[in-house]
Image (cartoon, helix red, strand yellow):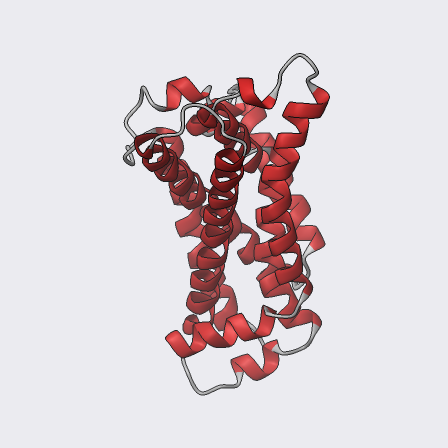
């Protein structure tokens, strides 16, 4: 299993996926600082606390733009196999095809969680260098849990994108379908984004609630989407003709 994951890492090491990942994870915290300092002339960075700054970063990650970016990474990891025609060699290996999907989804999960943690670490370093108020180990620990929660709850949407890529064998159409479904769910449920994604509520509400995973309807529906996506991904890869 470790060797398969290392092979996946080798595939994307010098690809555009890795370049986009490294650049974006560094730019997101910097961009938020610029928005605070430059666009809001009445707010100086020294008046923004560490908690407020990191909450802005978190809200950007789980925004529509963040969902698009995460799903693009997931779709590109699978889509490049079809684009480079390496999927055939992958499926001719005398092993169960389901392992191909499992390794891909596991690798995507590791990549997306690593991206989330990288943004958290870079944002924390920037806040320390700018001497933002409210920086305590307790706050860091709580924020780390919230970022991890957000990262885990973003994975099912990435799995859904992967299942669509396996069916369409392209990346653009699945991305569009995923975003349309995302918007329809929000519109038809008559909910704000902060209800679909509870952690996008104002930062002070985050710490009033339990940071552990809870059985809220939104969480159950999101994870159900991930389970269904994994099932159809495995079904599709087993029926795919070489």
Q: Residue at x 61, y 32 (%)?
A: 183
Q: Is residue 142 above or below residue 2?
A: above
Which residue is at 53% across, 21% downward?
48
In this orientation, does residue 239 appear? no
Between 227 and 124, the one lying in front of the other is 124
The residue under the point 55% across, 37% down is 61
Q: Position of residue 42 (x, y in %)?
A: 66, 12
**What residue is shown at x 67% (from left), y 30% (from top)?**
34
| Image quarter of residue 99 | bottom left
Quarter of the image for the C terminus: give it. Answer: bottom right
Give the total number of marks visible in the rendering: 0
* Rendering coords of residue 230 (x, y %): 43, 57
Can you give x and y, in whole percent of width and height, for residue 67 in the image?
Answer: 58, 41
Does residue 126 appear in this view?
A: yes
Q: Quadrant of the N terminus?
A: bottom left
Q: Work out whether 111 lies above or below 86.
A: above
The residue nearer to you, when weighing 43 against 236, is 43
Left or right, 191 with respect to 36, comes to left
Residue 220, compared with residue 231, is above or below; it is above
Q: Is residue 136 above or below residue 96?
A: above
Q: Quadrant of residue 20?
A: bottom right
Quadrant of the rendered structure where residue 12 is? Answer: bottom right
Q: Position of residue 109 (x, y in %)?
A: 45, 56
Question: Closer to the camera, 138 or 209?
Answer: 138
């Amino acid at each position: 299993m470790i060797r398969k994951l290392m092979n996946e890492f080798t595939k994307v090491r010098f690809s555009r996926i890795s370049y986009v990942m490294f650049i974006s994870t560094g730019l997101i915290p910097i961009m938020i600082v610029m928005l605070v300092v430059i666009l809001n002339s009445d707010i100086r960075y020294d008046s923004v606390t560490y908690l407020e700054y990191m909450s802005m970063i978190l809200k950007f990650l789980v925004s529509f733009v963040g969902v698009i970016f995460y799903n693009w990474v997931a779709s590109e990891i699978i889509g490049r196999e079809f684009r480079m025609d390496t999927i055939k060699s992958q499926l001719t290996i005398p092993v169960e095809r389901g392992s191909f999907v499992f390794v891909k989804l596991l690798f995507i999960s590791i990549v997306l969680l690593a991206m989330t943690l990288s943004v958290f670490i870079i944002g924390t370093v920037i806040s320390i260098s700018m001497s933002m108020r409210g920086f305590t180990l307790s706050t860091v620990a709580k924020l780390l849990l919230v970022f991890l929660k957000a990262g885990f709850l973003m994975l099912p949407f990435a799995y859904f994108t992967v299942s669509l890529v396996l069916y369409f064998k392209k990346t653009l159409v699945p991305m569009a379908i995923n975003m349309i479904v995302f918007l329809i769910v929000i519109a038809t449920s008559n909910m704000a984004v902060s209800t679909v994604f509870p952690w996008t509520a104002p930062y002070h509400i985050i710490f009033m609630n339990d940071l552990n995973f809870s059985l809220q309807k939104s969480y159950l529906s999101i994870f159900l989407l991930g389970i269904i996506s994994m099932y159809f991904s495995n079904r599709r890869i087993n029926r795919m003709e070489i």
